[in-house]
Amino acid sequence: MIRLTSTAIILAVGMTACIKKHTNQGSSTKTGPVALNPGEGYDSLKLRFTDQMCLKFTPDARDGVSEKQAFLERLENENDIIKSVGYQASGSFTYGLAKGDAKAALVEEGRSTERSVSFLSYMRVISKIVRAMSPQADGALNRTLCGDQYVSSVSYGSEITVLVKMNFAAEKYKNSFSAAVGGTYASLGDIKASLNTLDDETRKYTSIIIRYASTGESLTDVTKIFAGHDVINCSLTDFGACENALAAIVDYQNGKFIEHAAASQSVIAYELTPYPGTTFNIDTLIKARRDTLGQILTSEELNFQRAQSLAESVLLNSEERDAAKRTGQDISYNIAQIKDAIISCYDDPSSCDNSPKLRSYDTASLAHRVITKTATVSSEVTGVTNCSETIRGEVANNCKDQASKLPGDVEDIQVTLGSEDFENKDDIFNGRSCKIRVENSQCTIKLRI
């Protein structure tokens, strides 16, 4: 993970505290902007608030805090993304994903692959913090009613998370982009500028997805930028919508967002701390089962992305694309079943032993494959010595040019020379030279997809 700009950590956390960004995941009784209170119980077994106050404490409110955090990250793996958008552990992420949480959807979209690059732009401003000071248990704590943790502080304000993901038809185009963007970028504006420097071929085979998640009074303005949608798709050959959106987001982050955040009373973060003097442990078998379900979900999500890529590949014939599409449909069904199992496992831990019924499909069909394409080229050289060697090199270069235009990674090129039209001639300056033209040379190109 490459973190480029960041302020100090906003919330001071004790050694035993656990920070979770507020994403509404795991709560069946709290929806929308949550009226979360310091001291409220939380059940980490079920990932939900208990709506019970089981502590005595002194509230400490700080208004007008105006603390700001902002960074831009290139996301290299799923753990980086989970941490960046505020999921403290994979369990809370997988549950949020299963429940349809907006940030979890952003995480899923942002998972980098060998043919994609993702950037995450995050900004939040805290306008108020309320803490539970000097907590004391109000009698004996009941695990079922009180949970195993309590809300030790609540932060109010606004936040916006923007994901920009580039998908490339081949690794070579990803490498071209990485070379263009380099390692120096501080804002989405730098990413936009780098995209405009790419060569025509890379632009042809690159598409972009922009997605956001927002909390606080800023939501209305962000919705306008995205024209009422939560995602924008475009290609670099028709970059206008994405270019305008990126410019508008940068302007908004540097202007109105900060103004709106100062007046926002939306919950954007909270701290959870174990009850003082108590120890509650999650059953190791339940935790292991949840982890397993999360791993299966991750695997199926990656397989689904691969099936989609094959279903859209111009290098495959229609039958192969249809087969990949059918495989994707089976995987999509499995993903829905796994998500239902995850929800059940958290809502009712006794159901964790129930395995989801999944459809079988040929995973080998999703593996990388080498396909062969052919092209015909004609070449000519004139006024040179070593005519035969020169024309062979010219034909080889023309075959490489043809291969570079195909959206796949070239593994091998074989050249078969066509018919020659050869002419010797004398040049008083260069001595013996020739003119030669080769018609209909065959390029056999092996591509990995």
Image (cartoon, rainbow, N blue to C red):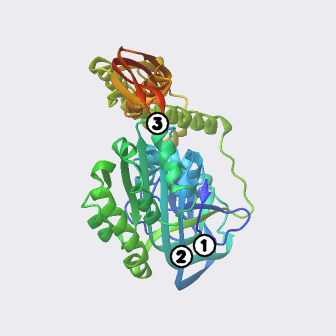
Mark 2, residue position: 68
- Residue 68, x across and y down, in percent: 53, 76
Mark 2: which amino acid? Answer: Lys
Tell me the distance, in whole angstroms, between the alpha carbons under discs 2 and 1. 7 Å
Q: Please, which residue is most extreme toward the bottom here?
A: 64
Mark 1 or mark 3: name the one nearer the start of the chain. Answer: 1
Question: For the residue labelled by badge 3, is the local secondary structure a helix, a strand or a loop?
Answer: loop
Q: Does the residue at mark 2 contact the one at mark 1 (Cβ under 8 Å)?
A: yes
Mark 3: which amino acid? Answer: Phe
Mark 1: which amino acid? Answer: Thr
Mark 3 or mark 2: name the one nearer the start of the chain. Answer: 2
Q: Is residue 99 above or below residue 159?
A: above
- Residue 340, x across and y down, in percent: 42, 36
Residue drawn at x 39%, y 79% as measured from the top left: 255
Quarter where residue 7 is shown? bottom right
Q: Nearer the viewer, residue 84 or 195?
A: 195
Q: Nearer the viewer, mark 3 or mark 2?
A: 3
Mark 3, residue position: 429
